[in-house]
Image (cartoon, rainbow, N blue to C red):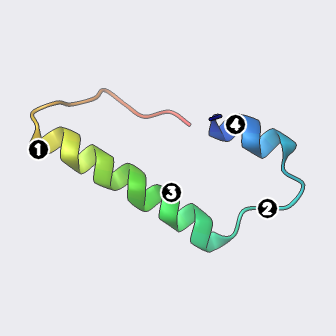
Amino acid sequence: ECNLYEVMKTRSIPFTEAEVRNWCFQVFQALAYMHQCGYFHRDLKP
């Protein structure tokens, strides 16, 4: 288990567009689920 920042620091090649799209999709799904459950957030920071 690690965080995205740590992976980016140690990775020697850029992420593919497909990888980035997949991660964004997962984040957006999680946000939609949180909103459906009545939770909200102030902002998201990278």
**Figure quadrant of residue 35:** top left
Question: For the residues marked 3 and 4, what is the alpha-carbon distance in whole angstroms?
Answer: 14 Å
- In the rendered image, residue 43, in percent from the top left (x then y), is placed at 37, 31
Q: What's the residue at 28%, 29% (across, down)?
A: 41
Q: Amino acid at mark 4?
A: Tyr
Q: Find numbered disc 3 in the image and state the secondary structure of the residue it sits on.
A: helix
Determine the residue located farthest toward the front in the rendered image. Answer: 1
Q: Earlier in the sequence, mark 3 or mark 2?
A: 2
Q: Can you identify the residue that label 1 sits on?
A: 36
Q: Which residue is mark 2?
A: 14
Q: Earlier in the sequence, mark 4 or mark 2?
A: 4
Secondary-structure class at tag 2: loop
Which residue is label 4 attached to? Answer: 5
| Side (left or right) of 17 relative to 27 | right
Mark 1 residue element: helix
> Spatial distance from mark 1 to mark 2, Cα to Cα?
34 Å
The amino acid type, in three-letter code, at marker 1 is Gln
Q: Quadrant of the N terminus?
A: top right
Mark closest to the chain's N terminus, 1 or 2: 2
How far across and down, in percent of the image, does residue 17 sit? 63, 71
Give the residue at mark 3.
23
